[in-house]
Amino acid sequence: MVSLTLLSTALMGLLAAATFLAVARIGAQRTAPGTDGSPDRYAAIVGALRDFIQKPVVWAVAFVAIAVGVGGVALLAVGDFGLPEGLSGSLLGVAYAAVGLLVTGFVFLGAYFGTRNRGLGNAHGVAAGSFAAGLVFLVLIAVQLLVGVVG
């Protein structure tokens, strides 16, 4: 047990160091906009992604893929397909987590775009979305403490 704790601590320390080095390296490579030809390439990539994302077919395919994926995982978890009992319990946890992340993402993006559509900036949108997502987690913790539905 102690060796697992030490291994976890070492891995988290390495992750923190790698994150620090990556941020320092990215910060050193940044240049002011308009000083080289990269903003044109950036604008072209962003424009292409915007055109791709704004198509309703992309949203429809993504919705169907997510619905079929979550439904398939839930079906594998509760169905009698000869899976080991421990795996089916884990799959059910994955299905719960996926639905929870989808709901939290919906709440975050709703608050974000609601704030952005009222004329405020990106930082205000992220703050409102983070606050809304935090409230979702706070409600989940309160329900867990009162009723004990998770786990």
Image: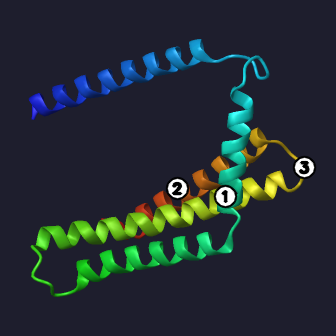
Q: Give percent across and percent down for residue 127.
A: 71, 43
* Amino acid residing under circle 2: Phe
Mark before the other along the chain sequence, 1 or 3: 1
Which tag is nearer the camera, tag 2 or tag 3? 3
Which is nearer the N-term, disc 2 or disc 3? 3
Q: Which residue is under mark 3?
A: 119
Q: Are discs 2 and 3 less than 8 Å apart at CB?
A: no
Front position in the image: 113 or 92? 113
Q: Which residue is mark 2?
A: 137
Q: Which mark is residue 37?
A: none
At numbered mark 3, what does the secondary structure look like: helix, strand or loop?
loop
Report the residue marked by disc 1.
109
> Nearer the N terminus, badge 1 or badge 2?
1
Left or right, residue 18 beside residue 126: left
**Amino acid found under the numbered disc labelled 1:** Leu
When asked about the image quadrant of residue 21, the answer is top left
Name of the residue lying farthest toward the bottom: 80
Residue 69: percent from the left, percent from the top? 38, 74
